[in-house]
Amino acid sequence: MSKDLDPAFPTGDYFDHPPAPFFDPEELLRWSFYRAVIAEFIATLLFLYVGVLTVIGSQSQDSAAVCGGVGVQGIAWAFGGTIFVLVYCTAGISGKLFYSFFLPRV
């Protein structure tokens, strides 16, 4: 059992782009590349800073008190909240770094 295909219509509803090179040396000459690298660096630095300070602050709290620190759940909320804020702030800048390398140019 086979379908009758009309030759006027293509068989797929998409267009396969030619493969893009993994690394384009022209990218190193663009300001957008360096802006994305700087944004990623600052976001990673802030993420580690907040995360490590939360863990250090949790360990240095008085454990004898009933509410002596943030605990494991507070650390998890600090990491999750920091990631949420940093992705929201830098996705428009550094998210393009992924697209410029791994998706083909049209």
Image: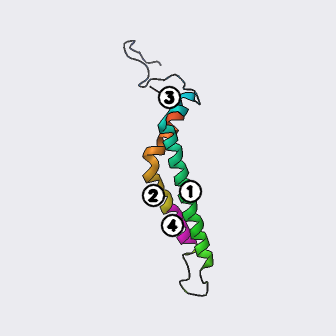
Q: Position of residue 75 (x, y in %)?
A: 56, 69
Label 2 sits on a secondary structure element that is: helix
Q: Earlier in the sequence, mark 3 or mark 1?
A: 1
Q: Is residue 39 located in the magenta-colored stretch of the structure?
A: no
**Mark 3 = which residue?**
104
Q: Position of residue 49 (x, y in %)?
A: 57, 62
Q: Earlier in the sequence, mark 4 or mark 1?
A: 1
Q: CA distance from mark 3 to mark 2?
A: 29 Å
Q: Return the residue nearer the eye: 103 or 27.
A: 27
Q: Residues within 10 Å of mark 1 (few under 14, many from 20)?
A: few
Q: Is residue 63 above or below residue 84?
A: below
Circles 3 and 1: CB atoms closer than 8 Å: no
Q: CA distance from mark 4 to mark 1?
A: 18 Å
Label 3 sits on a secondary structure element that is: loop
In the image, what residue occupies the spot 51% across and 39% down?
97
Q: Is residue 76 above or below residue 58?
A: above
For the C terminus, the quadrant is top left
| Region of the chain picked out in magenta, as a range | 72-80
Query: From the viewer's perspective, is the residue at label 4 or at label 1 nearer?
Result: 1
